[in-house]
Structure formats: C-alpha cells, structure tokens
Image (tube, rainbow, N blue to C red):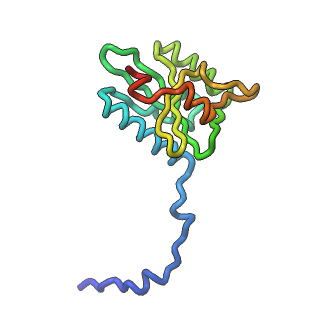
Amino acid sequence: MRQPIELSLMEEEPYRRETCKMSNKAKGSRVERELLTLFTENGWRSARVAGSGTNENTFCDLVAGKAGRKAVAVEVKSCKKDRIYITREQINDFVVFSNIMGLKAVIAVRFNYEGWLFLNPKDMEDTGNNWVVSLNNARSKGKRFAQFFS
C-alpha cells in the first residue's frame, strides 16, 4: 500500500526562484508560438522555422501564408524595455532570404503591455552598428495584425 505524502515535508523545502526562470531561448519560442496562434486564428497557415535563433542558416522565425495573399517571412522580437536592437547582419540576411524566397519581409515586435505591432524592415531606425525598433517608432510606424495583413 502506498504511503500518503506528508504535506509538512513538502512545505519545508524552500521555494527556489531560479528553477522558475525561463531562458531567452524558451521566451523566444513562447512568443513565436503565440504569434503562430495569432496567424492561425486569423485564417493564415504558419510554421515556425526549425533552428531559428540557434542556427546561422535560418534567417527568419516564422513563415506564413493565406490564399490570395503574398506569403510572409517573419522575424519575431519581444522586449521588456523600450528598444529592440537587431544586428545589421541579421536584418540583411533576413531581407535577402525573404527576397530569394519571394516572401514579404515582416518584423513582428511585442513590447510589454503593447501587444503585437508589425513593421516593414525599412521602417527600422539605423544606429550605425545595429537596426533598432523603439517603442515610439513601433507605435507610429507599426500596425496591428488586422491593419498590416488586410
């Protein structure tokens, strides 16, 4: 017969915050899945690109398409702060890949408490070493899903 678990023993073990922390890769995967769901809920078909963010030969995070619309390559970024920096090389590779594949290049950004905003890569700001999407720029030049993909 199984012994019941003593709750008092379980309660004595201290809570360890570090076991609950999410890695950057896990956070990136989570927001990619969230965006994939948004595409699906709006009648698009989409897929995450295997190895995105870890493999130097993957140039986007998602691909998505819908009948009668041009398919898109999506670079997904999220941030707690008010600026997202992306290397010049990453954006250049992304745009070249999109063009070769005949896909429209889209930058999808999500700042905390703002929801998703979508931009063309040309709407990003050039800092010299990187491309940056600021919260203010995303608000002014970015569009919500229904506006961007209508």
Residue at 41% x, 87% y is 8
Vertical comparison of 30 with 10: above or below: above
Toward which corner of the image does residue 35 lie, by quadrant?
Answer: top left
Residue at 57% x, 64% y is 18
Tell how many labels: 0
Vertical comparison of 17 with 49: above or below: below
Quadrant that contains the N terminus? bottom left
Residue at 54% x, 58% y is 21
Residue at 50% x, 31% y is 108
148 or 31: nearer the viewer: 148
Residue 120, how many percent across, how many down? 54, 21
Vertical comparison of 136 with 126: above or below: below
Q: Residue furthest left?
A: 1
Q: Residue furthest right?
A: 128
Residue 56, how many percent across, how many down? 60, 31
Decide if residue 139 is on the left or right side of residue 86: left
Residue 88, how many percent across, how many down? 68, 26
Toward which corner of the image does residue 59 lie, by quadrant?
Answer: top right
Quadrant that contains the C terminus? top left
Decide if residue 119 is on the left or right side of residue 34: right
Decide if residue 59 is on the left or right side of residue 2: right
Residue 69, how many percent across, how many down? 36, 15
